[in-house]
Image (cartoon, grey):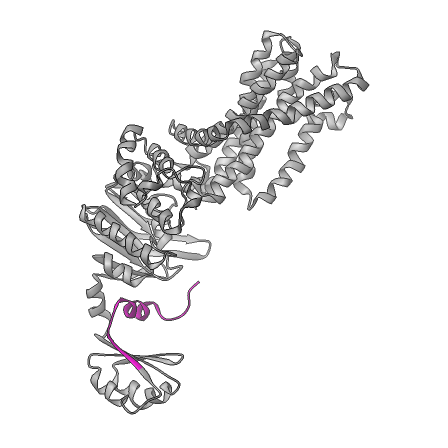
Amino acid sequence: MPLLEVKDLRKSYGDLEVVRGVNLSLEAGECHGLLGPNGAGKTTTLRLCLGLAEPDAGEISLLGLPVPKAAREARIRLGVLPQLDNLDPDFTVFENLLVYGRYFGQADAVTRGRIPELLEFAGLTNRANSKIQTLSGGMKRRLSLARALINDPDLIFLDEPTTGLDPQARHLIWERLKQLLNRGKTILLTTHFMDEAERLCRRLSIMDHGRIISTGSPRELISRHIEPEVLEVYGEDVAGWAAEHGDKLAMRAEHTGETVFCYTSRAEPLIATLQNRPGLRYLHRPANLEDVFLKLTGRDLRD
Amino acid sequence: MRAKDFRPPALSLRFAHVWRRNFLVWRKLAIPSMLGNLADPMLYMLGLGYGLGALVGKVGGLPYITFLAAGTVCYSTMNTATFEALYSAFSRMHVQRTWDAIMNAPINLDDVVLAEAVWAASKSFLSGCAILIIIWVLGLSHSPLTLWIVPLAFLVGLTFACLGLVMNAVSPSYDFFLYYFTLLITPMVLLCGVFFPTDQLPGVLQAVSAVLPLTHAVQLARPLVVGVAPAAPAFHVLVLLGYAAVAFYVALVLTRRRLLS
């Protein structure tokens, strides 16, 4: 049975339909990524699944229980890492975990037994008595993740777990999330970082304008939607080169400013035309998830 | 507004977890907080009670400081609950997003709002007790009836906590609370018989005064301090409870609209 099953979910705010018929199914043990630009409807979908907002239409089953009807009961076995940290600033690291355990109706003895392991997991063992204000952004994020595990949940929602963190902090979080997956936890993750999605997710759903526009493993998505090789060409005269060669030889070419992205299954003929063009630089690489994402959601800025 | 926001309150004992969270934070700053609870009303009571009392003599058949002491119990418990339900609850709801964190756990908004109301009333209870001790220490009353001040402080706190939570639910920022103080709290302090008997007021203002909740609190507290049973105690208690119940429901509906859309 899927740990989370969403059917034809819809939600409008005023005239704006933010979620427009989302279908989603999470198998036990998988990390499923919800990938989309800002405003795609990812966070609203999570809120609906948590029972914090009422859908206009559709069905949600979370950990076998109907949401929003039995959302509270379902949350007993759920962990949530919110997009913005909301650790309790009036408490120390240790107290944050202890008090959060109480919200689950969990006996203090059980929580106290779990805290040392969680602090170790978060790399905060020697910060147990620190105030929240003294923690770095990365530490806060790790503590939030530890807090999401206080009830030893079966399913974990992670809303943009590494947004705003430096590379070191991001890698550490990814390492921890992999540990959780190895322990058999199921994760639903929203992100707009392709590398994060590629590293962690077994399956991805790309979401835009309130709809899921494609679902599959990272490799499937790449082979389904995009040519295997990419040649990025930069330089002042790139437009002239593209008109002469790029647009003709590539299967698909996208122009943005002084860069042309040429998508192709064979880059050699394109590279050959660049040999006598000292004004142009190029990068030849395999296609990746970001190319898929940009193809499906467009290159226009979202806010 | 959606129909769903108007559903009846779904309350449970889980509110106690949230209450306990607030208590734990308070405990860290208990001494400065208690001193704050005491200092302000004590200065009013001593300053006005002795200073003004020397000029006005007896008021309502009582030494002015005794008259004022009963009013101070009510006004101070009102203030404590109001500040807690406005500034502190707003911090937890809007600024720190503590409520969001709690609602990701298996606790629903209705229980969070209940916890805030009961918590603010608990702080009023403490502040009422503190003033009662001053009343005893200053020898303003020796009647065992003053012990009724203890539950009364909780009730008055609950009433004003619920009223404050209505404001909390609709405020975009802290600045907004000034309107509440200007339009509700200040008239309450000046028209409800805290500093002088309401029969000094012109008829129109007396009519306004009669419907304000603080009036009913004062009409319970003053006889208790004097050591006589209040007239129609059930009526005044019901008025306060009525304000609390209606305000709680309105606060809940508005908070649902704000946070659960």
Q: Does B24 sit above or below residue A233?
A: above
Residue under the point 58% across and 20% down: B130
The residue drawn where x is 67% and y is 18% is B69
Q: Is residue A286 rendered magenta in the image?
A: yes
Q: Kindly indicate the quadrant of the structure image that contains residue A227.
A: bottom left
Relative image position of residue B257 (x, y in whole percent): 47, 43
**Depth order, front residue of B77/A224:** B77
Q: How many marks?
A: 0
- Which percent across, then down, holds residue B38? 60, 24
Query: Is residue B158 shown in magenta?
Result: no
Q: Which corner quadrant holds the C terminus of chain A?
A: bottom left
- Does residue B45 appear left or right of residue A119 in this picture? right
Is residue A49 at all visible to an observer of this figure?
Answer: yes
Q: Kindly indicate the quadrant of the structure image that contains residue A107.
A: top left
The residue located at (38%, 44%) in the rendering is A52
Q: Is residue B215 visible?
A: no
- Please provide the residue range marked out in magenta: A282-303
Name which quarter of the figure residue A70 lies in. Answer: top left
Residue at horizontal 53 percent and vertical 34 percent from the top: B85
x then y, percent, for residue B10: 40, 31
- In what quadrant of the picture does the N terminus of chain A appear? top left
Q: Residue furthest right?
A: B55
In front here: A22 or A80? Answer: A80
Q: Depth check: give the residue in front, A135 or B155.
A: A135
For residue B120, side relative to residue A1 (left or right): right
Query: Can you say whether A75 is above or below B228 in the image?
Result: below
Query: At which x and y percent is residue A102?
Result: 34, 32
